[in-house]
Amino acid sequence: MSKAHRRGKDTERAVARLVGGKRVGWLGGEDVEHELFSFECKAHSGEPPRWLLDALEQARGHAGEKVPVVVHQYHRG
């Protein structure tokens, strides 16, 4: 198993633990099964875009004891 593949699986497990879901990524559908959300997990070694880091910092600043969440919606223009 490649390092990248293992990192992806580790990310899926961590997300499942965090949200109380179940890792089901090996089944070909969503990566983490949850009663309310459908999770697709991605892990990479490059730097995330600055706007994403800023959004996460803002969410963390407002979250208090809650889990910060950033939602991204892409618009083609």
Image: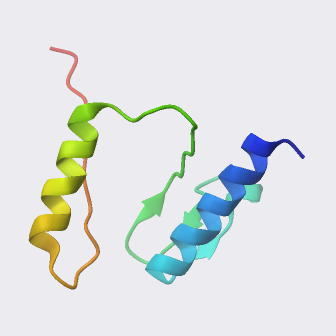
Q: Is residue 36 left or right of residue 31?
A: left
Residue 10 is at least partly visible in this image:
yes
Q: Quadrant of residue 47?
A: top left
> Residue pushed farthest left?
62
Q: Residue 76 location in percent, x, y? A: 22, 17
Q: Residue 40 location in percent, x, y? A: 52, 51
Q: Residue at x 9, y 69 (%)?
A: 62
Q: Is residue 64 above or below residue 13?
A: below
Residue 28 is at least partly visible in this image:
no
Q: Quadrant of residue 48?
A: top left
Q: Residue at x 14, y 14 (%)?
A: 77
Q: Residue at x 47, y 78 (%)?
A: 18
Q: Is residue 11 left or right of residue 36?
A: right
Q: Quadrant of residue 43?
A: top right
Q: Is residue 24 above or below residue 71?
A: below
Q: Is residue 43 above or below residue 48?
A: below
Q: Residue 1 location in percent, x, y? A: 90, 46
Q: How is the image coloured?
A: rainbow
From the viewer's side, name the closer residue of 29 and 10. Answer: 10
Q: Is residue 59 left or right of residue 22?
A: left
From the viewer's side, name the closer residue of 42 and 58. Answer: 58
Marker count (numbered): 0
From the viewer's side, name the closer residue of 9 and 60. Answer: 60
> Residue pushed farthest top?
77
